[in-house]
Every structure is written in C-alpha cells, then in structure tokens.
Amino acid sequence: DDSHEFFTSDLTIFPLDQTVCEQLVFYLRRIQQMEKRQTLCSSLLHVFLNEICIYAQGHPVLRYSTANRTMSLVLQYIDAHLEEELCLVSLAEHFHVGVTKLCEDFKKYSLYTVAQYIRFARIERAKQYLQNGMTVLETAMRCGFSNECHFITVFRQAMHCTPGQYARNCRTFHKNIN
C-alpha cells in the first residue's frame, strides 16, 4: 500500500497517496534550498500546507471509506462527469434513489451538499487545467460552467483571485522554483 497519513490539528487522519507525498517532499526540499529567501519560503510553505488541507477536505471517499457504497459511486460519477450539467434529479434517477435520500446520504457521507461538492470538484479540476496552461474560456467549458463569466465569479469566490491571476501566479511560482 503506497499511502501515508496526514494528521490535522484536530487529530483527523487523512490518507495521502504516494503522488501527493512525493509532491510534498519535492516542495519541502525546494523550500529548504531557499534559505536566504525566508519570506518566499514561508509563503510557499503556507500555500502548500493550505493545498494539502484543501486536498484532504475534497476527498471524502478517503475520509469515510466505510460509508455507503452508493455514495462512493455518486462521487465517482460526479468526478467523471464534471464537464456535463449535473443536477440532483438526474443524479437521483441515475442511481435509482429519491432526491431527498440522495441529499441526506450525500451530506452524511461527504459533509458537503451535492452542489457544494460539484462546485469544489470543478474548481479543483479548473486549477489543474490553469496550471497546465489552458485558457480561462477553455477551462470554464471543460469544467462544466455555463459560461466564462460564471466561471470567473465562482472561481473568485472560492480562491479569492480570478482564474487569470491564479494562472499567472502558478507560472511565476514554477519559474521561481526552477
């Protein structure tokens, strides 16, 4: 098993896969090499630890592995269909459950409402696309947003910056550590 555990201050345990652990080690080594740039190092460490917390919050399947199999399948379905229009009625029909039951079980299982999880998952996917150089418009369309303006609004609410600013910050960050 290639998983490790990350403990939060409230002693919640989040399993982290090997890829995340390798990224953590990579960035921590980069930060150690930047001793003379303490402000930058401190900022990078803060950003990375924040990303770990966001990662952990966004992986309810890992946090609640004994939960209902159907909710696990719902999460997998949502993640696989983020670019499509996702609504409660169609999800409930697809999994042969009532809308109320879906909402109750999903919230119990993931600690998110269905809409919150979809929004969170779309923003996480958008961050990956933006980091890889995709345009804001293309990212919006590939993440299931109805238009670019709506995407920018939702992204700004979640990340406290526009998608364009986020992409520029990523490019600057990668340029500085390389």
Image (cartoon, rainbow, N blue to C red):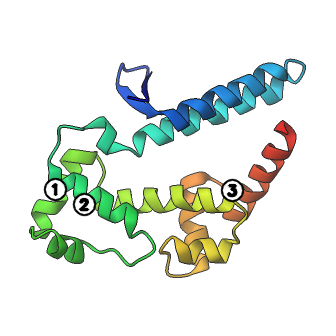
> For the point 10% across and 70% down, which residue is it?
96
State which tag comes first along the sequence, 3 or 1. 1
Instruction: Give the left or right position of residue 7, taking residue 74 as reference.
Output: right
Q: Are the residues at dot 1 and dot 2 in contact (C-beta closer than 8 Å)?
A: yes
Of the 4 image quadrants, the one containing the N terminus is top left
Q: Which residue is mark 3?
A: 131
Where is residue 123 shown, x and y percent of the image? 52, 59
> For the point 50% across and 75% down, which residue is it?
145
Dot 1 amino acid type: Thr
Element carrying mark 2: helix
> For the point 23% across and 77% down, which residue is it?
90
State which tag comes first along the sequence, 3 or 2. 2
Q: Which residue is mark 1?
A: 70
Where is residue 60 shown, x and y percent of the image? 32, 43
Instruction: Give the left or right position of residue 133, taking residue 85 as reference.
Output: right
Query: Residue farthest to the right?
Result: 36
Where is residue 77 shown, x and y percent of the image? 30, 64
Of residues 160 and 34, the one nearer the viewer is: 34
- Residue 150 appears in the figure: no
The residue carrying pointer 3 sits among few (fewer than 14), some (14 to 19) or many (20 or more) residues within 10 Å by Cα, namely: some
Element carrying mark 3: helix
Dot 2 amino acid type: Val
Q: CA distance from mark 3 to mark 1?
A: 32 Å
**Which quadrant of the view contains residue 9?**
top left
Dot 3 amino acid type: Gln
> For the point 15% across and 68% down, which residue is it?
95
Where is residue 35 shown, x and y percent of the image? 85, 18
Q: CA distance from mark 1 to mark 2?
A: 6 Å
- Residue 81 appears in the figure: yes
Q: Which residue is mark 2?
A: 74
